[in-house]
C-alpha cells in the first residue's frame, strides 16, 4: 500500500507540473494579447468536457477534463474567419464586434510577441527547474574522495574479472591508500577535481609520485608508482568509443587502481543556461529524426525490439516513469526529487521546442504566417502595389488538419507503446 501511494505521488507531481506548464504557457499568450488590446473570450486548461469555469469581465476562465493542452481564444486570429463572424452576427441585442480589437489587426512584432509568449514561459520554467536541479541539488560528479581501491590492475579487454592470489598488488593498494581517503594534493600540487588526479597520474610516466590524502581529519602523504595499462577510450558521455569494425578503442595510460566517489556537487549559476541549451539541442535533434524514431517505436510496440530509454515518450509514459521513480525502494528520496524535477525541466524544454515548429496550428506556424504577411506587405509597399491584406488562413486549413492528424497518430502510437512496451528505468 505504501508503494502505491508513493507511485501516486510521482504521477501527481507530473500531472500538476504539466498543468502548471500548460497554464503558464497560455498565460504567456494571454498577457501580451490583453496588453495589446485583443479581446480574449476564453482561457482554458485542458480539452474535452468542461469541469469548471467562471467568467470575469469579457473572459471565461476554466478547466477541462483532459489536461493535455490548453488554449486562449482570441478574437480575429484569422481575418477571413473574423469576416464570417461579422456576417453571422444577426442578433441586434448581441455585443458588437470591435474589429480594432482583433488579433489580425496587430503589428507584426506584436503578433510575434503574443505567439512567442507561450513557448517563452516554458523556457523560463525550464530554466527555473534546471536552476533548482543544478544549483540546489547539484549534479553527480566524480570527486577526489576514493570509493574503492583495486587489489590489482587488469588491462582493458582482459578475460579475468578477479585478481589472482599471486597477482601483483595495484600501486594504490601497495601504497596503503584506502576507501574513504580524500586526495588533496599530488607531488605538492593541490587537486580539487578527479580530472586533475587523473592528469597528474597519467603525466607521471611511471615515476614515483607523492599522494597527500585526508582521512578522519588527519593528512597523510603516501608514495606510489603508476603502472602502464590499456584502458578503453570513452566520449564525453562516458560511452566506450568503437573503431570502424565495431571493436572498442583502447589507449595506453598510467594508473594506480583507484575508483573515485560520486557525490552531488552544486553547480554555479553559469551552468544553468548551457544545460538548458544542451537539452534544447537534444529535443531539436529528436524532432529532426522523428520519422525514424517513430518507426523504431512501432517496431518495439509490435515486435520484439526493446524501447530506447532516450527515445520519444507520451505523457502517459512520463507519468508511469514518474510513478516508478517515486515508488522505487532502492532510490534515495533526494535522488527521487532530482529525477522528478529533471523530468519537469525536460518536459518544458520539449514544450518550448515543439511549439516553435513552423506548422499550423502550433505557435511557430502562427509566427511564420505573421512574418510572411509582413514580408508580403513590405514588398507590395516597395513596388507601390495595393496592400494585399492579411494572410488568408482558409488556405492553411488543410495543412492544419493534416498536421493535427499526423501528431494525433504519433500520440496514439506512443501511448500504445507506453502501455504494451513501456520504458523501464530499473530493469
Image (tube, rainbow, N blue to C red):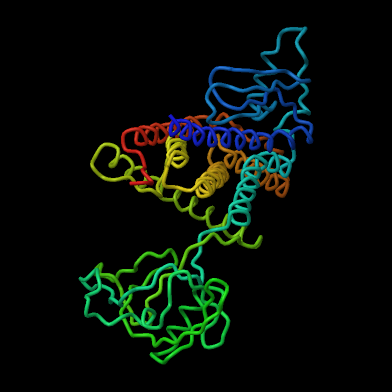
Q: Residue 182: x, y in percent?
A: 51, 73
Q: Is residue 57 left or right of residue 198?
A: right
Q: Which residue is at a point 27% across and 70% down the rendered structure image?
A: 244
Q: Which residue is at a point 63% across and 24% down the rendered structure image?
A: 81
Front residue of 118/239: it is: 239
User: Which image quadrant for residue 184?
Assistant: bottom right
Q: Residue 373: x, y in percent?
A: 65, 41
Q: Where, quadrant-wise, is the N terminus in this rendering?
A: top left
User: Which image quadrant for residue 28?
Assistant: top right
* Residue 364, placed above or below residue 143: above
* Residue 79, placed above or below residue 291: above
Q: Which residue is at a point 51% across and 69% down the rendered structure image?
A: 143
Front residue of 374/281: it is: 281
User: Which image quadrant for residue 91?
Assistant: top right
Q: Is residue 426 left or right of residue 163?
A: right
Q: Residue 55: x, y in percent?
A: 73, 18
* Residue 143, placed above or below residue 221: above
Front residue of 323/107: it is: 323
Front residue of 426/174: it is: 174
Q: Residue 17: x, y in percent?
A: 58, 37
Q: Which residue is at a point 66% across and 60% down the rendered structure image?
A: 269
Q: How many marks?
A: 0
Q: Is residue 378 left or right of residue 254?
A: right
Q: Is residue 62 left or right of residue 292?
A: right
Amino acid at each position: 500500500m505504501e508503494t502505491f501511494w508513493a507511485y501516486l505521488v510521482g504521477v501527481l507531481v507530473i500531472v500538476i507540473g504539466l498543468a502548471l506548464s500548460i497554464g503558464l504557457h497560455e498565460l504567456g499568450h494571454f498577457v501580451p494579447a490583453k496588453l495589446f488590446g485583443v479581446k480574449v473570450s476564453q482561457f482554458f486548461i485542458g480539452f474535452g468536457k468542461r469541469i469548471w469555469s467562471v467568467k470575469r469581465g469579457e473572459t471565461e476562465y476554466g478547466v477541462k477534463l483532459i489536461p493535455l493542452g490548453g488554449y486562449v481564444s482570441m478574437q480575429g486570429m484569422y481575418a477571413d474567419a473574423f469576416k464570417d463572424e461579422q456576417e453571422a452576427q444577426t442578433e441586434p441585442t448581441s455585443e458588437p464586434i470591435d474589429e480594432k480589437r482583433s488579433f489580425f489587426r496587430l503589428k507584426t512584432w506584436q503578433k510575434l510577441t503574443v505567439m512567442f509568449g507561450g513557448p517563452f514561459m516554458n523556457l523560463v520554467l525550464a530554466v527555473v527547474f534546471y536552476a533548482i536541479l543544478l544549483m540546489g541539488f547539484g549534479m553527480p560528479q566524480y570527486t577526489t574522495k576514493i570509493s574503492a581501491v583495486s587489489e590489482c590492475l587488469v588491462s582493458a579487454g582482459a578475460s579475468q574479472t578477479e585478481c589472482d592470489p599471486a597477482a601483483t598488488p595495484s600501486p594504490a593498494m601497495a601504497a596503503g591508500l584506502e576507501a574513504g581517503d580524500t586526495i588533496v594534493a599530488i607531488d605538492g600540487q593541490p587537486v580539487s577535481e578527479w580530472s586533475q588526479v587523473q592528469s597528474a597520474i597519467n603525466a607521471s610516466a611511471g615515476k614515483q609520485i607523492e599522494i597527500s590524502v585526508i582521512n578522519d581529519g588527519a593528512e597523510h602523504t603516501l608514495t606510489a608508482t603508476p603502472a602502464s595499462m590499456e584502458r578503453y577510450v570513452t566520449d564525453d558521455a562516458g560511452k566506450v568509443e568503437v573503431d570502424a569494425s565495431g571493436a572498442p578503442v583502447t589507449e595506453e595510460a598510467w594508473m594506480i587502481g583507484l575508483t573515485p566517489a560520486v557525490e552531488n556537487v552544486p553547480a554555479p549559476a553559469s551552468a544553468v543556461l548551457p544545460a538548458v541549451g544542451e537539452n534544447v539541442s537534444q529535443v531539436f535533434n529528436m524532432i529532426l529524426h522523428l520519422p525514424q524514431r517513430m518507426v523504431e517505436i512501432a517496431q518495439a510496440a509490435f515486435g520484439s525490439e526493446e524501447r530506447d530509454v532516450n527515445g520519444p515518450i507520451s505523457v502517459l509514459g512520463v507519468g508511469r516513469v514518474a510513478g516508478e521513480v517515486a515508488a522505487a525502494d532502492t532510490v534515495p528520496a533526494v535522488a527521487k526529487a532530482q529525477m522528478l524535477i529533471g523530468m519537469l525541466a525536460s518536459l518544458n524544454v520539449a514544450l518550448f521546442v515543439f511549439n516553435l515548429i513552423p506548422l499550423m496550428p502550433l505557435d511557430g506556424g502562427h509566427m511564420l504566417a505573421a512574418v510572411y504577411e509582413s514580408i508580403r506587405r513590405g514588398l507590395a509597399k516597395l513596388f507601390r502595389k495595393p496592400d494585399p491584406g492579411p494572410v488568408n488562413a482558409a488556405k492553411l486549413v488543410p495543412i492544419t488538419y493534416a498536421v493535427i492528424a499526423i501528431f494525433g497518430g504519433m500520440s496514439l502510437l506512443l501511448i500504445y507503446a507506453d502501455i504494451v512496451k513501456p520504458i523501464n528505468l530499473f530493469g
